[in-house]
Image (tube, rainbow, N blue to C red):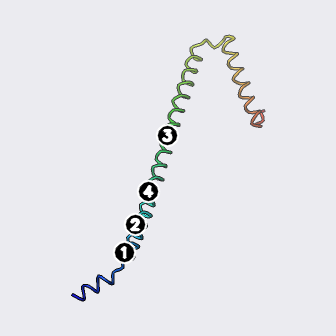
Amino acid sequence: MNAQASSVENTDPLGSIADAMKDALNQATEDASRTRERMSQVGTDVGNSVSRFTYTTSYMVSYGVVYATVFVAKSIPQDNAIVKGLIDGGKAAVDAVNEAKGIKPAA
């Protein structure tokens, strides 16, 4: 019985608490690391989804606008003042954008 009593006396209750706290801290650190990894993956997935949504929306809007414009332009007779005005206005807009960008007109 003395052997059991001496083993009980040699165990340090504060040492056990310290060991438990170290284990808890290590576990919390590992959990935080895993959570950080998961969050970075989720952030990447969300970023990709937002990017894909933005691209698809922009594509659909631009396609719809351009398609409708070309459809209307093709349905108007070509030899009249409206079409000539649209063509000249479009060329002037392209020239203005090129000038703003510093691009010299083609000779």
| Closer to viewer: mark 2 or mark 3 | 2
Please tell me whether mark 4 sits on a helix, a strand or a loop: helix
Residue receiving disc 4: 35
Query: Are the residues tagged 2 and 3 within 8 Å (C-beta)?
Result: no
Q: Which mark is residue 24?
A: 2
* N-term-proximal mark, 2 vs 4: 2
* N-term-proximal mark, 2 vs 3: 2
* N-term-proximal mark, 2 vs 1: 1
Residue receiving disc 3: 52
* N-term-proximal mark, 1 vs 4: 1
Q: Quadrant of residue 20?
A: bottom left
Residue receiving disc 1: 16
| Closer to viewer: mark 2 or mark 4 | 2
Residue 32: percent from left, percent from top: 45, 59
| Image quadrant where one finds the C terminus | top right
Residue situated furthest left in the rendering: 1
Residue at the spot 63% in from the left edge and 14% down from the top edge: 78
What's the amino acid at mark 3? Arg
* N-term-proximal mark, 4 vs 3: 4
The residue lying toward the viewer, choosing from 37 and 29, is: 29
| Image quadrant where one finds the N terminus | bottom left
| Closer to viewer: mark 2 or mark 1 | 1
What's the amino acid at mark 4? Thr
Please tell me whether mark 2 sits on a helix, a strand or a loop: helix
Residue 10: percent from left, percent from top: 33, 84
